[in-house]
Image (tube, rainbow, N blue to C red):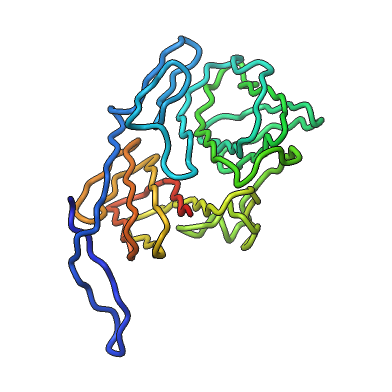
Amino acid sequence: MILVSKWYWTAGGFRVIMVGMKLTVRRSHERGFADHGWLVARHSFSFADYYDPAHMAFRSLRVINQDLVAPGMGFPTHGHKDMEIFTYVLEGAIEHKDSMGNHAQLKPGQIQVMSAGSGVKHSEFNPSKTERLHLIQVWIMPDRANLKPRYAEWTPTPEQLAAPKVLIISNDGREGSAHISQDADVYRVKTSSAGTVSHALRQGRGLWFQLIGGDVEVGGVKLSPGDAVSAEDAGVFAFKSAGPIEALLFDLA
């Protein structure tokens, strides 16, 4: 158990009490790994040929895959059902086609969100002949089955681009976020310099912080790119960095 600072508001301002808040660390090198030549992937949870009963999911969060896709390669048409899926592009571009008639290319900073619902087929390719595609794909289990499939894209505004913490996905679409059918808030954390990004986790909810780039310290735990930390104790979590970082932060029912 790792002790983490828990913050309380009093009439005199914030005060800190050290309590037994448990942080669970998932190191990058401990994730599942696959090298198919054209695809190099890391799996935070059991996926495809990688199976680990200790890492099946975290609350409604079922998949976090970090993929490197070679130029001109990708995933041919395949089906999904009853899953909320979003793809976050880090480098290059992704070309998406689906059975709903959507056809789009997305670039770094953009997100595509697809509710597979009652069933949908899609393909995902790297359209470049020279540049690799680097992406993170996330699957979140929906709050009910057999929803009508849908597709959306999220592109940050100039204000969102400059903000260190931005809500990108939610159940109600607030603050310009994309909608999914699950009580889950997903934030993009991205800074251009040293600083601290905080998040208040309410009682009964769970936090998963997936670091993409840079180095972060939270509750005395140091994280490197690809590392993650999760928690299920309420409190304020302060993610401190000595330089630029990029991450995804999940606040889950």
Asked whether, in this view, residue 102 is left or right of residue 82, the answer is: right
Is residue 214 positioned above or below 135 on the image?
below
Identify which residue is drawn at 46% across, 30% down.
65
Identify which residue is drawn at 53% across, 33% down.
137
**Residue at the far right in the pictured view:** 101
The percent position of residue 39, horizontal first and vertical second, equals 49, 16
The percent position of residue 200, horizontal first and vertical second, equals 39, 65
The percent position of residue 208, horizontal first and vertical second, equals 39, 47
Is residue 85 positioned above or below 162 on the image?
above
The percent position of residue 48, horizontal first and vertical second, equals 48, 19
Asked whether, in this view, residue 9 is left or right of residue 49, the answer is: left
Identify which residue is drawn at 24% across, 53% down.
22
Asked whether, in this view, residue 220 is left or right of residue 226, the answer is: left
Is residue 119 positioned above or below 237 on the image?
above
- Report the label total: 0
**Residue at the far top in the pictured view:** 37
Which is more toward the observer, 224 or 208? Answer: 208
Identify which residue is drawn at 64% across, 23% down.
124
**Residue at the far bottom in the pictured view:** 11
**Which corner quadrant of the image does residue 232 belong to?**
bottom left
**Residue at the far front in the pictured view:** 145
